[in-house]
Image (cartoon, rainbow, N blue to C red):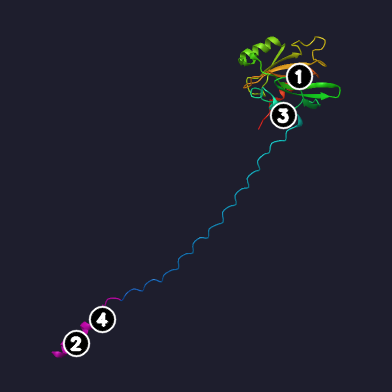
Amino acid sequence: MNRRLALAAALLLTGCERHAAPGPEPRPTAQPSPAPPVASAPAPSPTPAPMPTAAPLSAADRLILGQWRKAANRGECAPLHFRSTAGASGTPRPARFSGGWAVAWDQPQVRSAFGIAGVAILPDDHASADAQRDRLARQWQHLRQLDTLPQPAFAGYGVEGAQPYPVTNPEGKGLNSLAYLRVGGQTCTYNVWSRISRAHLEALLENLELLPTG
């Protein structure tokens, strides 16, 4: 009997060992952290384009500005200049216009061959643009719109003295062609003249623009 009990106990112990709880699972080996990405160098900033520089003033433009700065009417008669003298050469010089400013171009055989002036302010100069246009249309044989200037801008012109061009000389060659101008934003009446021809005067009018004063 005792032998049977001892054998049963031995069998029971063997079964327990076969079903013993497993041991702890092995811990996974830690993997190294990935290296942080290398920051790329910033792209170079584009080189800014150089600022355009203003073209130097011509001798004639410097004369116009100098005469304008001394004129009594400078607050109401901004300086104008010619982008081009329409193929005519000459030596610019100051010209006298009481209360205003002027520059004339002399040629070897012709004094004051052409030029421009901002004349003194007269009482009628304060009238409206429509009234000024009507006045010039009545005074002169020809009226012209001036698109290169601040609007409204227009000119009446003909032979000096507000005379028409003669039938025998419709191009006004050798005559003093004269224009009276009105420019938007200005009070004075400008003068432009040419002793070369009517066509030259008309070309000068088409080449007019305000002259910067800064």
Quarter occupied by the N terminus: bottom left
Q: Nearer the viewer, residue 192 or 101?
A: 101
Residue type, mark 1 in image: Trp
Q: Quadrant of residue 120?
A: top right
**Above/below status of 133 relative to 66:** above
Residue 98, magenta (yes or no): no
Mark 4–mark 1 Cα distance, whole angstroms, equals: 129 Å
Q: Mark 2 or mark 1, which is nearer to you? A: 1
Check whether the beta carbons of the residues at disc 3 and disc 2 lie within 8 A of each other: no
Q: How crowded is mark 3: few (under 14 residues within 10 Å), some or many (20 or more)?
A: some
- The residue carrying mark 3 is 66
Check whether the beta carbons of the residues at disc 2 and disc 4 lie within 8 A of each other: no
Residue 193's label in the rendered image is 1
- The residue carrying mark 4 is 17
Residue at 27%, 79% (x, y): give it.
18
Q: Mark 3 or mark 4, which is nearer to you? A: 3
Looking at the image, residue 212 sits to the left or right of residue 112; the answer is left
Residue at 71%, 29% (x, y): give it.
65
Which stretch did the figure color magenta?
1-22
* Image x and y of residue 84, in percent: 75, 27
Mark 2–mark 1 Cα distance, whole angstroms, equals: 145 Å
Quarter occupied by the C terminus: top right
Mark 3–mark 2 Cα distance, whole angstroms, equals: 135 Å
**Above/below status of 40 relative to 184:** below
Q: Which of 25 and 16 is in front in this view?
A: 25
**Secondary-structure class at tag 4:** helix
Mark 3–mark 1 Cα distance, whole angstroms, equals: 20 Å
Q: Sequence order check: which comes first, mark 3 or mark 4?
A: 4
Residue 173's label in the rendered image is none
Residue type, mark 2 in image: Leu
